[in-house]
């Protein structure tokens, strides 16, 4: 009897380890193929002019093999979107759009990747100089996926397109739409992560438009509403970019940094802010201090 029990336990352990190894392999092999595809693509991105047809085919083969052999894996969902992006990078826009249409049908519950698929489809249309079609895809992302990273970026992308192409009237309208969009998202999600991100994008929008007064006011409001030791690392670089580098206003930056310094008890952040305040103070003319 005891011998039979030991045998049964051994059999069960064997079955367990077989399934364990199988499950590890189920993700290991597609992950390995995905890693190989990314490494091959990195070589192409590093020197596009030196990219050969063989190098391009290698990336496509690795990604398509994942989709064929491991269609239900988590890696396949990443590879699906990545393949569409790769087709755009290799200037096969029609193929990218056709592939992304299929991806959109498959990713109905994966909001982040679905938003990216719509965005990439719009990007492919934009590359083909079909702005009306691109804008249609971008609006889908903006209106239906505003809670995603790419959804938050879309209003600024639309505005930038009009600015770059010298379409001033449409650029003004797109800028106004972007400001309203970020204010609405922030207001509806106040004190939540999405509201926090919308507030940062609002600051970025004002900065890109050279609206210094609005940008500074938005920074100060952001600090008052969203300051915490965990999030302050996101606002400090924006202060540097917008207030110091873009608007050349070290005095205002010192004032803002000082207000953050008064709130923090973190020794590392305190040291960083004190260093920045000293460096900027040395650049302010004596008469204005």
Image (tube, helix red, strand yellow):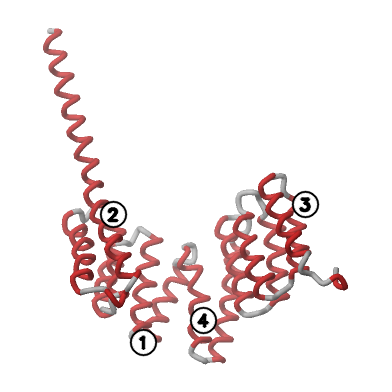
Along the viewing direction, whichever of 6 and 271 lies nearer the viewer = 271
Mark 2 or mark 3: name the one nearer the start of the chain.
2
Q: Quadrant of the N terminus?
A: top left
Circles 3 and 1, Cβ within 8 Å, touching? The answer is no
Residue tagged 1: 130
Residue 189 or residue 242, whichever sits in front: 242
Q: Earlier in the sequence, mark 1 or mark 2?
A: 2
The CA span between labels 1 and 2 is 31 Å
Helix, strand or loop under label 4: helix
> Is 233 left, or right, of 126 in this rendering?
right
C-alpha distance separating marks 3 and 1:
51 Å
Give residue 160's mark. 4
The location of residue 135, given as percent across then percent down, is 42, 81
Instruction: Specify which label sits upstream in the sequence, 2 or 4.
Output: 2
* Alpha-carbon span between mark 2 and mark 4: 33 Å
Q: Which residue is mark 3?
A: 262
Mark 2 surroundings: few (<14), some (14-19) or many (≥20) residues within 10 A: many
Residue 162 is left or right of residue 73, and the answer is right
Q: Are marks 4 and 1 in contact (CB under 8 Å)?
A: no
Mark 4 vs 1, N-terminal side: 1
- Which tag, 3 or 1, sits closer to the chain's start? 1
Q: Can you tell which of label 4 and label 3 is closer to the viewer?
A: 3
Q: Position of residue 32 (x, y in %)?
A: 25, 51
- Mark number displayed over residue 22: none
Q: Secondary structure at mark 1?
A: loop
Which label belongs to residue 75? 2
Q: Bin the neighbour count of mark 3 within 10 Å (Cα to Cα): few under 14, some 14-19, many 20 and up.
A: few
Q: Secondary structure at mark 3?
A: helix
Residue at 60% x, 65% y is 200
Q: What residue lies at 60% left-to-right and 74% top-to-bottom?
A: 205
**Residue 99, position in %: x, y?**
25, 71
Q: How many angstroms separate mark 2 from mark 3 (CA)? A: 46 Å
């Amino acid at each position: 009897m005891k011998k039979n029990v030991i045998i049964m336990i051994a059999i069960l352990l064997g079955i367990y380890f077989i399934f364990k190894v199988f499950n590890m392999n189920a993700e290991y092999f597609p992950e390995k193929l995905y890693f190989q595809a990314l490494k091959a693509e990195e070589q192409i991105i590093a020197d596009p002019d030196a990219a050969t047809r063989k190098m391009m085919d290698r990336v496509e083969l690795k990604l398509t093999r994942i989709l064929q052999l491991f269609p239900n894996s988590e890696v396949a969902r990443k590879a699906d979107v990545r393949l569409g992006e790769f087709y755009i990078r290799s200037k096969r826009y029609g193929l990218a759009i056709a592939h992304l249409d299929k991806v959109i049908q498959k990713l109905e519950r994966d909001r982040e990747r679905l938003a990216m698929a719509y965005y990439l489809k719009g990007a492919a249309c934009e590359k083909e100089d079909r702005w009306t079609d691109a804008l249609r895809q971008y609006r889908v992302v903006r209106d239906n996926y505003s809670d995603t990273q790419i959804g938050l970026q879309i209003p600024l992308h639309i505005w930038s397109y009009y600015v770059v192409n010298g379409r001033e009237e449409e650029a003004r309208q797109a800028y106004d739409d972007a400001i309203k969009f970020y204010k609405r998202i922030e207001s509806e999600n106040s004190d939540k992560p999405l509201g926090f991100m919308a507030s940062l994008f609002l600051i970025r929008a004002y900065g890109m438009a050279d609206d210094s007064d609005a940008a500074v006011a938005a920074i100060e409001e952001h600090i008052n509403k969203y300051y915490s030791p965990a999030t302050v690392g996101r606002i400090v670089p924006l202060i540097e970019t917008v207030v110091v580098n873009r608007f050349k206003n070290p005095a205002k930056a010192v004032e803002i940094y000082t207000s953050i310094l008064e709130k923090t008890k973190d020794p590392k952040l305190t040291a960083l802010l004190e260093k920045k305040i000293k460096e900027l103070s040395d650049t302010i003319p004596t008469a204005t201090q």
